[in-house]
Image (cartoon, rainbow, N blue to C red):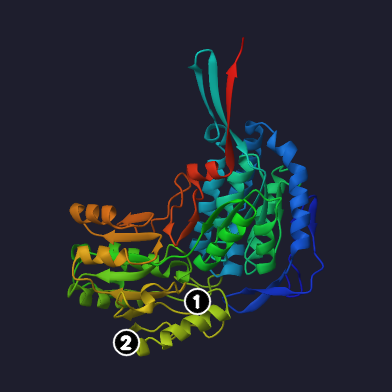
Amino acid sequence: MSQADAVPVLVGEGWLTPEVEGYTPVHRPATGEVIGRTPHCGGAEVDLAVEAASRAFPAWSSTPAPERARVLFRYRELLEAQAEVLAEIVCRENGKTREEARGDVRRGLEVVELACGIGQLAKGEVLPELAAGIDGSATREPVGVCAGITPFNFPAMVPMWMYPLAIACGNCFILKPSEKVPLTANRLAELFLEAGLPPGVLNVVHGGREVVEALCLHPGIAALSFVGSSPVARRVYEWAGQTGKRCQAAGGAKNVLLVMPDAVEAGLLGEAAAADPALNGVLHSAFGCAGQRCMAGSLLMGLGDACDGLRDQMASAMDTLTVGDTLTEDVDMGPVIDGAARQRLAGRIAGAADADLAVVRDGREGVPEGGFFVGPTLLDGVEPGHGLFTEELFGPVLGLMRPRSLEEAIDWINRIPYGNAATIFTGDGGAARAFTRGVECGMIGVNVGVPAPMALFSFSGWDQSFFGDLHVQGTEGVLFYTRQKTVLSRWP
């Protein structure tokens, strides 16, 4: 795609280039090169997409579940065959490393595999002789036209959290991917059409706030899924409620990694530190995907005086990470998404000294000059009253904290307004049990740095990390995209 190319939208029968006044440049973050332009669609394009989805809904919702599953099976095979191509698109427009991009595609593919079992997942219940001469049954029915609004950080996985399950359940869908990463979403949709999905069942519109607001407020949309920052998630939830939509809105996070003294061998530095299971888990959690994920560990806790050794080991392990162009080099970490993100993160690092934080490792140094790079950063001295304790930076910046005991660590974690994820590294079963029982968040890791559930389980953030009742993926995802019909029958 050249710089002049506008990204098309998918409405009903096929792809078209909308006539709009504004565009968002699509960058290759590793170089800053513009590789496309995302059109700023608006209410008119949303209306067309809703009309197309509404026309397709009667036929698709009445298509037997096994036939829907066959389309999904064919889609799964195409995704598998195109996995490397999709991963390269993700690398280009997002900046992930190749392995991270492959993981992005792979985790999305797992949801498609889950959706292939829709005949089993959406089965209802029957109780004969519920009362004298009366039989009772309950079925799961599609809700109608659904929409999904997704972020830039997982161009493949997060969209596939939504539309495969929604469509498998008999709904039609409108996807609004991040305007920063539209190319992966378009390719995913192309493959679904190639698998035999009827026109109008999946539509793709592009744009920014205007499209988001139009989707949230459109009376023809029955259910809305969102992933993004917590302030926007809250607003989306409020907008959706104005028109009676069911809504699942996943927000941000401030995830904690607690390393107990028994988890890391003393004296490990450099490559040895980077290879240690606990330290490697911290590295992967904090700096994988350049820290741009809601599951990133952004606060590291070490108990008391033992934290000094942990700080030195972490800084040494961070020095082993190679930052660079993920398409042309064998690197461990790529760039952040754009120049604005780089500037924002550099500003927070620069302001650390004024906030009484020690910059143990400065991510502004030793990174490539081209592209939007910020290296692994470690800031020591974070305390519960500090802004960094609750602010989601969404980048490769790790704050170090020093609770005096496991009990104090749990107390600090529970003061964070988000309720997304927390991990403990330890060989002590009692400590692990106290942590998993005491920490108030939806996803817990024990010696697992990124405790992101696979498709069989729901992505279960709490508090300011989620607005709604039913989460994405798993059983809750099926329940969200269906509604129950109960039938009582008496035959004379």
User: Spatial distance from mark 1 to mark 2, Cα to Cα?
Assistant: 30 Å
**Is residue 249 or residue 380 the one in the foreground?**
249
Residue pointed to by mark 2? 356
- Locate the C terminus by quadrant: top right
Q: Residue at x 38, y 86 (%)?
A: 352
Can see residue 320? Answer: no
Q: Please determine whether, in this image, residue 14 is positioned above or below residue 389.
A: above
**Is residue 210 or residue 175 the one in the foreground?**
210
**Is residue 397 or residue 143 the one in the foreground?**
143
- Judged left or right of residue 440, residue 374 is right
- Judged left or right of residue 221, residue 410 is left
- Locate the N terminus by quadrant: bottom right
The residue furthest top is 492
Q: Which mark is residue 186?
A: none
Q: Please determine whether, in this image, residue 130 is positioned above or below residue 37.
A: above
Q: Marks 1 and 2: which is nearer the front?
A: 2
x and y percentages locating residue 353 in the rendered image: 35, 89
x and y percentages locating residue 254 in the rendered image: 40, 67
Q: Residue at x 47, y 67 (%)?
A: 289
Can see residue 360? Answer: yes
Residue pointed to by mark 1? 324
Q: Please determine whether, in this image, residue 155 is positioned above or below residue 339.
A: above
Disc 1 element: loop
Q: What amino acid is found at the position of numbered circle 1 in the picture?
A: Gly
Q: Earlier in the sequence, mark 1 or mark 2?
A: 1
Q: Residue at x 34, y 61 (%)?
A: 422
Residue 134: image quadrant is: top right
x and y percentages locating residue 237 in the rendered image: 56, 58
- Crowd tier of the residue under label 1, counting other residues whose Cα lies within 10 Å: few below 14, some 14–19, many 20 or above: many
Q: What amino acid is found at the position of numbered circle 2 in the picture?
A: Asp
